[in-house]
Image (cartoon, grey):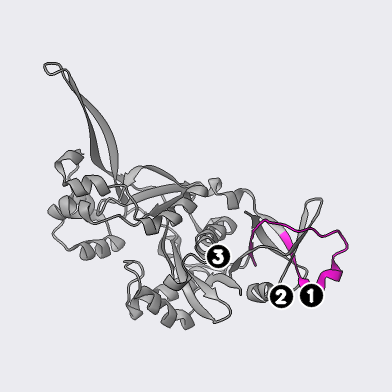
Amino acid sequence: MAFIVRMAEEKDLKDIYNLSKSVELFNLPPDKDFLQEIILISKKSIASTPIPKIKSQYLFVLEDTKTKVVIGTGQIKAQKTHDKRANYTFQILQEKKYSHSLDIFVDHKKLKLTEDWEPLTELGGLVVAKDYQGSPNKLGKLLSFARLFYISQFVERFNQRLYVEIAPKSQALWKSLSSKFIPLTYKEADLKSKQNQEFFSSLLPKEDIYLSMLSEQAQKDIAQAPDKSLPAMKLLEKTGFVYRDEVDPFDGGICLRGRVQHLPFYKKLCKTTVHSMDNLQSISKPLEDTDKYFLLSNGDTENFKCALVKPLKICHYDSDIQICCEQEILDSLKIKSGESVTSFVL
């Protein structure tokens, strides 16, 4: 059984819509018109002459090649910030107070609204169908890594600075703080923020906010990820993303930052020749068993296809790496035996 990550197509609308109904993601709502628009924008973004970076959005799908069903999605917004749109977060600050008369130290945490105007590429919308979660085929890893693999191959389409918001553990911060200043429902405010975040700066306090003034639940859940989001967060941290005491102003969800030049995929991209097990006679060098996994891509921005493969055999010759896989892997990547592809060794 083979699984690939590729770019979304119009034919995927039904499957993506079904996925959207199983999750609560504002950037993947169960709205066919909205999803159709994302697919169209993605197709314009991957074109050889793409639309402007500030309008580009990439929609990736994870496909079960046996059933031809889309079982996951992931997104990249090429440029979240520009001269009319900043990115806002709450910075968590530490403060120590001391009373001479009581001879007591008290530690406090504070929130400070910060704005970031520098170019920023955002990753989001990572979904794997429930029936496929926990699969031994490492589907979450494939989908998460494929987006970063794509960025590493086509760096000119993105910004060096990368940004991810992790789902919050609860909406306690919204209920205890942000909703007191933003007269919208949580859903309305989050949808509005996808278009423009100016109201963050205009309505939220610019003064330091002491966490001790908020509800116990808000203090407990801020900067905490739900169990279901921990695997995705750990994968991102393995690829160089870091937490810098920043949270989403809505709900206190963790914000991670990274840089393209720090991605292992960017630093160690290589070429690998892929052979079908049906065509081993074409390899003149000794073959060995391997326990390594390879992330493989056809290197095509418009017809991008990516697979996570554990080769049946491997051959090293100087700087050349050749691997042998089942024919279905080659078929899924639309490559021929003996063809060279872009790769990364995990």
Query: Considering only order in the chain, which callout, 1 or 2, is on the residue closer to the N terminus?
Result: 1
Residue at mark 2: 327
Q: Kindly identify the residue that appears in the image at 57 percent across and 55 percent down.
A: 152
Which image quadrant for residue 244?
top left
Circles 2 and 1 in contact, beta carbons < 8 Å? yes
Describe the element under mark 1 as helix, strand or loop.
helix
Q: Is residue 269 left or right of residue 172?
A: right
Q: Is residue 84 left or right of residue 271?
A: left
Q: Position of residue 334 (x, y in %)?
A: 66, 75
Residue at mark 3: 136
**In front: 84, or 168?**
168
Query: Considering only order in the chain, which callout, 3 or 1, is on the residue closer to the N terminus?
Result: 3
Badge 3 crowding class, 10 Å Cα cut-off, few under 14, some 14 to 19, many 20 or more, is few
Q: Position of residue 217 (x, y in %)?
A: 20, 49
Q: CA distance from mark 2 to mark 1?
A: 7 Å
Q: Which mark is residue 278?
A: 1
Q: Quadrant of the N terminus?
A: bottom right
Q: Quadrant of the C terminus?
A: bottom right
Q: CA distance from mark 3 to mark 2?
A: 20 Å
Q: Kindly identify the residue that appears in the image at 44 percent across and 64 percent down.
A: 75
Q: Kindly identify the residue that appears in the image at 78 percent across and 55 percent down.
A: 320
Describe the element under mark 3 as helix, strand or loop.
loop
Q: Is residue 80 visible?
A: no
Q: Is residue 102 left or right of residue 346?
A: left
